[in-house]
Structure formats: C-alpha cells, structure tokens
Image (cartoon, rainbow, N blue to C red):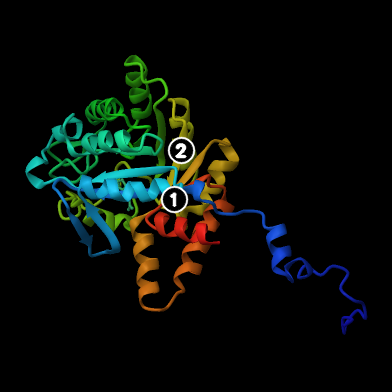
Amino acid sequence: MPSLITGLYPNRRLRRNRAHDFSRRMVAEHNLTVNDLIYPVFIVEGNNITQPITSMPNVNRMSIDVLLKEAEQIAKLGIPVLSLFPAIESEKKSLLAQESYNKNGLVPKAVRALKKEFPELGILTDVALDPYTTHGQDGIIDEQGYVQNDISVETLVKQALMQAEAGVDIIAPSDMMDGRIGAIRHELEKHGFVNTQIMAYSAKYASCFYGPFRDAVGSAKNIKGGNKKTYQLDPANSNEALQEIYQDLSEGADMVMVKPGMPYLDIVQRVKETFAVPTFAYQVSGEYAMLTAAIQNGWLNEKSAIMESLLCFKRAGADGVLTYFAKQVAEWLHQQ
Ligand code: PBG
C-alpha cells in the first residue's frame, strides 16, 4: 500500500529477507556452535560426590570420579574445553595460600586424571588464590587487608607452573594483579612449556554477579573487606579495560577474556575491534542464576533465553563463551 503521505510504495522492504526461515538462515550474520563453548565445573575432594549449589540450580560440585564421567559426555558433545574450579576444604586454606601450588592438590590431580583419559579435551585452570586463602581474596594481604601485588604474583607464578606441570592446556589468570602475565609467561618458557596457552582474564570487573560462584567455591563468607575493588575493574570504566587487555597481550597472553558477560558486551565489542585477538567472555554465576530463576518461575522460555543470550555474545565479537549452560546448549545444538 502506498504511503498515505507520499503516495509511494516503500522502495525498500527490510522485512522481505525475514519472511521465510531459509532466508533468515541465509542472511544470519552470526551463529553459535559447539566450538564456541567452554564448560566450567566445580570440583571437590572425595569419591562419588555430587553436591548441589543452592544459588546455582542444576550445577553441582563433583569429585574427580564423577568429573571423569561428566568429561566423557563433554568430549562426546564436542565441547573443546573444560575449565576447573576447586572448592577447597577450610583446613587447607591459609593466609599464604600454600595449597594453591601443592602438586598433589585437588586441581593437579583432576588435571592428570582428565588428561590421561581424555587427552584431546582441552583443560583450562584458573590462576588465583581465592579458593585457597582464609580471607577469600585473590592474593596475599597485609595487616590492613590490602592485597599485595608483587608477593601475590610470586605465588601465582608457582601455581601456574604447577598447573602446567600437571598437563593443563590453558592457564587462565583471574587474579587481576599487575605484571602477572609476564611473570607467568617467563616461568613457563624457562621450564620448557612453550605451548601452554595463557587466557588472561584481563578485563575482570569488581562485579556483584560473582556471588553464586563464591558460594560454590566457599569463599563468600570469608571475603575480608567484602569486595575486590582494589584490583578488579570498576564497572564504570571501559578505557581502563582496554589498557588491561593491551598490557596482558604485551606480556604474552594468547587470548583475553572479559568478565562478567551480558552486562559487559560493550567491552567485548571494543576489545575485539581494538585488538583483533581471540576474545572470550564469561557468562558468570550471577547471570546463570538470573536466567535460571526466571526460567524456573516460568517467566522466560528456557531454550530461547539461553540460546539468545549466547548468540548475543557472538554478535558482540566473542570467539567463545564460558557458560554453565554449555552442556545443555551442546545437546540442543546437536538436536538441530
Ligand atoms: C576467582 C574467580 C571468580 C570467578 C572466576 N574466578 C570469582 C571472583 O573473582 O570473586 C567468578 C565466576 C563466576 O561468577 O561464575 N578469581
């Protein structure tokens, strides 16, 4: 129908390409595949243990034997990488986080078991001290509770080397100390780990959306000072995130990460456009909790909400997403 004002037919109908499913698929600019997923899992000591996490429905802490069964499914689904987060017993936590570089600790044991059974499955481990400190901060504190940079880096370097020795493929420092990527890279090179990748949590914000994760690893109650604002980024800033990314790349990071995910897609886009490097994003525990709560209440459709949320990461420029939904999403993608 011609326009009532101009008397003309529209010369361009943008809806034409949207009219049929084949056409919508043909013009789609982005899509989500199994290769875009990284699956985070929580591990605990023991045998045959599956512990639910209240603030993260359907996510469990699991012992290594259970983890191996889970990993078999993950490998079968074609998810490229599994990322490990330990919940450490409180007796093993200390001010100096010595357990973080224990060669016989939970993480290296899990890594060795996984690499033995599933050598092709990529394994990523977090480098940070919060699961191992009595106070739940990511580094070593002074009497005032301030997280000391350079001493913390020394411990993080030990932790990273121990992880590389256990056979980890990707080391992911999530501590936000200055200079840690360079220090870790140097140590890895010195010990011949030239192909151990580093995925730097470069743009990691001091976010409230990590709350459920801190429950999962048992660091929430402990956090002295209640927040991590003296090292994690201020949610008000975006230029500063680019400086962090620049710094980590120049110190030897192979890939970078933005975290949290959904409220920070503008950062993902700026990072990708500015640096054109492999860029990942973390759909964190609080995002998982928000979506899951709405889904459980029947307020959002499960599959549509989850799939849309992940596709949007791709549109923003992410090469992949760490998401607690990874396994479910891989199953859906295979059904299509
Ligand atoms: C620890 C770490 C955190 C997360 C990943 N690694 C928590 C924090 O910084 O307090 C959060 C992940 C999530 O919320 O899903 N350095």
How far across and down, in percent of the image, does residue 25 sit?
68, 60
Say which label, 1 or 2, has the lower sequence index.
1
Q: Which residue is mark 1?
A: 77
Which of these two is toward me, 240 or 263?
A: 263
Which of these two is toward me, 270 or 218?
A: 218
Which of these two is toward me, 130 or 165?
A: 165
Residue at the farthest right position: 7
Q: Quadrant of residue 19?
A: bottom right
How far across and down, in percent of the image, does residue 286 sit?
34, 60
Q: Secondary structure at mark 2?
A: strand
**Would you say 71 lies left or right of 36 here?**
left
Amino acid type at image mark 1: Leu
Amino acid type at image mark 2: Val
Q: Residue at x 16, y 32 (%)?
A: 104
In the rendered view, tell whether residue 20 sits above or below residue 324. below
- Residue 228 in view in this figure: no
**Would you say 204 lies left or right of 211 here?**
right
Q: Which residue is mark 2?
A: 256
**Mark 1–mark 2 contact, CB under 8 Å?**
no
Image quadrant for the C terminus?
A: bottom right
Image quadrant for the N terminus?
A: bottom right
Q: Secondary structure at mark 1?
A: helix
Report, in whole angstroms, how far the alpha carbon at label 1 lies from the one at label 2: 25 Å
- Residue 116 in view in this figure: yes
**Would you say 31 lies left or right of 53 here?**
right
Q: What mark, if any, has residue 138 been given in the picture?
A: none
Q: Within 10 angstroms of label 2, few (less than 14), some, or many (20 or more) residues?
A: many
Q: Residue at x 24, y 26 (%)?
A: 158
The mark tally for this picture is 2
Instruction: Mark 1 and ligand 1: say if the CB distance to the nearest ligand atom is below 8 Å.
Output: no
Instruction: Mark 2 and ligand 1: say if the CB distance to the nearest ligand atom is below 8 Å.
Output: no
How far across and down, in percent of the image, does residue 305 sit?
48, 67
